[in-house]
């Protein structure tokens, strides 16, 4: 197995004296820390996170004079400020992480970075692996962030063995320095879209529940809503989810159930009942149909005026949801006709619905019962 380098520097064009000075400080600090741990590995295995922070600080100050770095400019900050160590007057900081496991992975800091020190432009990750043979490594912060997970808030996942092209930022097709400067809502929106698109490509029915638009803390049941609130949600579902009109019965309602939980904090164990309850419809505009229509047709016609209004006068929520869920070509300046085109095409492709002239019924404002 190829030994990963213990220190990786920023790949900067035209490194100035400050960049070189910080590189020398951290490179020598990592060397000092690994020499110390190799002499007495047992002493380091039980170190806490705060112990590692103090050890990192002491190591930097120990080697500072050898690289002509003023040790008084090396500060360990408290009160959960990000990053943990500031190298004053350099624009650099160092985030300290460690694990008791024999692994180079751990959970990192919040993606929001609300407590970031405003003077810090570049951050190094200094990581201590205390399990197995203890070892320390250091590399640019953004080069070791592999993914995003949730504890009480979205946080980066650290992987010190990560190739730069596999970072979460490479996956999202952005740069860390661009991403970190986005407003919080834009950060959440970008990550949210990445995971929704990823699930769609992998044909998985999942979404990042912790990034929904809802502000409700408690979950409640969809069935307890008023009739009007239910119809509002059903209309939005008819707009957003073409799975409702597909022939895949197994996965027809799963994305809608996730969406309800994610966006509205609502649980619905029997989502299909609202689209298929009551069986088939036999009366159209007061006349008996030769062939009964599936119940989904009635839901579309019943909610048509609401659907049309939502698409012709979209609110911010429906616009964001369309951006997330519509995986077909559409005209952003004519959402209503784009939806009509989509639903007509889906009906034609589904043997259970292909006999229904859905577009004509919608345009005629037909009534089913």
Image (cartoon, rainbow, N blue to C red):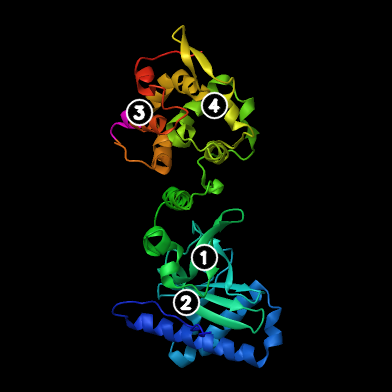
Query: Disc number at residue 340?
Result: 3
Q: Measuring from the top left, give residue 111's x and y in whole percent.
A: 50, 58
What's the magenta region?
A: 333-339
Q: Measuring from the top left, give residue 363's x and y in whole percent.
A: 34, 18
**Residue 130 position by quadrant:** bottom right
Q: CA distance from mark 2 to mark 1?
A: 16 Å
Main secondary structure of the magenta stretch: helix
Q: CA distance from mark 2 to mark 3?
A: 52 Å
Q: Nearer the viewer, residue 49 or 255?
A: 255
Q: Relative to residue 20, is residue 241 drawn left or right?
A: right
SS category of the residue bearing label 2:
strand
Query: Disc number at residue 275?
Result: 4
SS category of the residue bearing label 3:
helix
**Residue 226 position by quadrant:** top right
Q: Circle 1 sits on which residue?
A: 82
**Residue positioned 36% across, 41% down in the render:** 328
SS category of the residue bearing label 4:
helix
Query: Disc number at residue 139?
Result: 2
């Amino acid at each position: 197995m190829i030994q990963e380098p213990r220190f990786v520097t920023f790949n900067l064009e035209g490194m100035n004296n400050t960049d070189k000075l910080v590189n020398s400080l951290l490179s020598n600090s990592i060397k000092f820390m690994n020499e110390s741990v190799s002499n007495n590995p047992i002493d380091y295995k039980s170190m806490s996170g705060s112990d590692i922070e103090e050890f990192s600080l002491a190591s930097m100050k120990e080697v500072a004079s050898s690289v002509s770095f003023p040790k008084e400019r090396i500060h360990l900050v408290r009160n959960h400020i990000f990053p943990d160590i500031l190298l004053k007057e350099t624009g650099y900081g160092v985030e300290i992480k460690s694990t008791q496991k024999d692994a180079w992975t751990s959970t990192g800091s919040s993606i929001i970075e609300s407590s970031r020190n405003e003077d810090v432009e570049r951050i190094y990750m200094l990581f201590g692996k205390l399990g197995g043979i203890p070892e320390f490594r250091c590399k640019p912060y953004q080069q070791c962030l592999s993914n995003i997970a949730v504890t009480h808030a979205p946080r980066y996942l650290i992987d010190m063995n990560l190739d730069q092209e596999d970072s979460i930022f490479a996956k999202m097709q952005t740069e860390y320095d661009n991403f970190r400067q986005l407003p919080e809502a834009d950060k959440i929106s970008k990550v949210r879209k990445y995971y929704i698109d990823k699930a769609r490509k992998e044909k998985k029915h999942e979404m990042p529940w912790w990034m929904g638009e809802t502000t409700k803390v408690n979950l409640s049941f969809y069935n307890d809503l008023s009739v009007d609130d239910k119809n509002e949600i059903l209309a939005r579902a008819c707009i957003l989810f073409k799975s409702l009109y597909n022939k895949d019965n197994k996965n027809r309602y799963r994305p809608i159930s996730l969406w309800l939980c994610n966006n509205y904090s609502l649980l619905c164990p029997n989502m299909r009942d609202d689209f298929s309850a009551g069986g088939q419809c036999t009366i159209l505009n007061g006349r008996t149909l030769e062939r009964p229509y599936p119940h989904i047709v009635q839901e579309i016609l019943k909610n048509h005026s609401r659907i049309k209004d939502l698409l012709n006068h979209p609110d911010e929520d429906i616009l964001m949801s369309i951006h997330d869920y519509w995986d077909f070509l559409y005209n952003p300046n004519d959402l209503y006709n784009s939806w009509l085109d989509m639903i007509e095409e889906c009906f034609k492709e589904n043997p259970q619905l292909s006999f229904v002239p859905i577009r004509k019924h919608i345009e005629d404002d037909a009534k089913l019962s």
